[in-house]
Image (cartoon, rainbow, N blue to C red):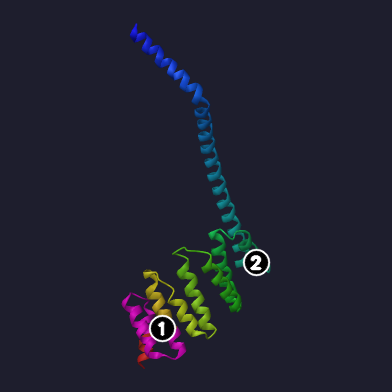
Amino acid sequence: MDGNITEEQQVEQIKAWWKENGKAVVLGAVIGLGGLTGWRYYQSEVQSAKEQASNAYTQVITVLESGNANGVADVQAFIAAHESSQYSVLASLQLAKVQVQNGDLDAAAEQLRWAISHTDDAAILPVAKTRLARIYAQQQDFDKALAELDQVGSESWQAKVDELRGDILLHKGDKIAAREAYVSAQQLGGSPALQVKLDDLAQ
């Protein structure tokens, strides 16, 4: 009998607890399921946005590289529309490349500075910074070019950076410092062209 009463009491306790807390449990479950559905929807939307940006990037870069008169304007519009996406940074790099080819160094430098300020991607930054350093060197602003190279911290880029530093120093007229930079680049496993550059300096 006592056992039956205990069991009944347990049932009553469960009923009482459910009466007080059941709505909250159901609501929590609904919210939980809604949150899961919402998260999946959000992930789907993010993926869709990435795919759209990727497709749009491919289209505008194709137009740009074709030499179409609208290419530059199309890429600039793409960058403005996708400013928070890394595709805008890639587009900026491509636009700067074309601007250099067209002789518009000021615009190219502006694009590269924008790209550098809008990414922390360790693969993109060295590319953008070395290209910007080359532009400064072309503009005869050698100190600015060298300062930009000093900002490249990636170890895998040091041989390229030292070789470019040597080129800039040579154009600046500092043959001793240029040679030191070339030797450093060679020791880091730089390009075969370094030996030719060193031989030219020895003459």
For the residue marked with disc 1, what is the amino acid?
Gly
Q: Real-space Cα distance between discs 2 and 1?
A: 35 Å
Rendered location of residue 20, percent (x, y): 50, 24
* SS for dot 2: helix
Residue at 54%, 67% in the rendered image: 115
Residue at 41%, 76% in the rendered image: 161
Which disc, if any, is residue 52?
none
- Quadrant for the C terminus in the image: bottom left
Q: Which residue is mark 1?
A: 166
Q: Which residues are magenta?
A: 168-196
For the residue marked with disc 2, what is the amino acid?
Gly
Q: Which residue is mark 2?
A: 71
Asked if residue 110 is positioned above or below residue 141 in the image, the reply reads above
* Residue 3, image quadrant: top left
Task: Count the labels in the image.
Answer: 2
Rendered location of residue 172, percent (x, y): 46, 89
- Quadrant for the N terminus in the image: top left
Residue at far right of view: 69
Rendered location of residue 52, percent (x, y): 59, 52
Any magenta on residue 182?
Answer: yes
- Which mark sits nearer the N-terminus, 2 or 1? 2
Crowd class of label 1 (few under 14; some 14 to 19; many from 20; radius 10 Å): many
Any magenta on residue 148?
Answer: no
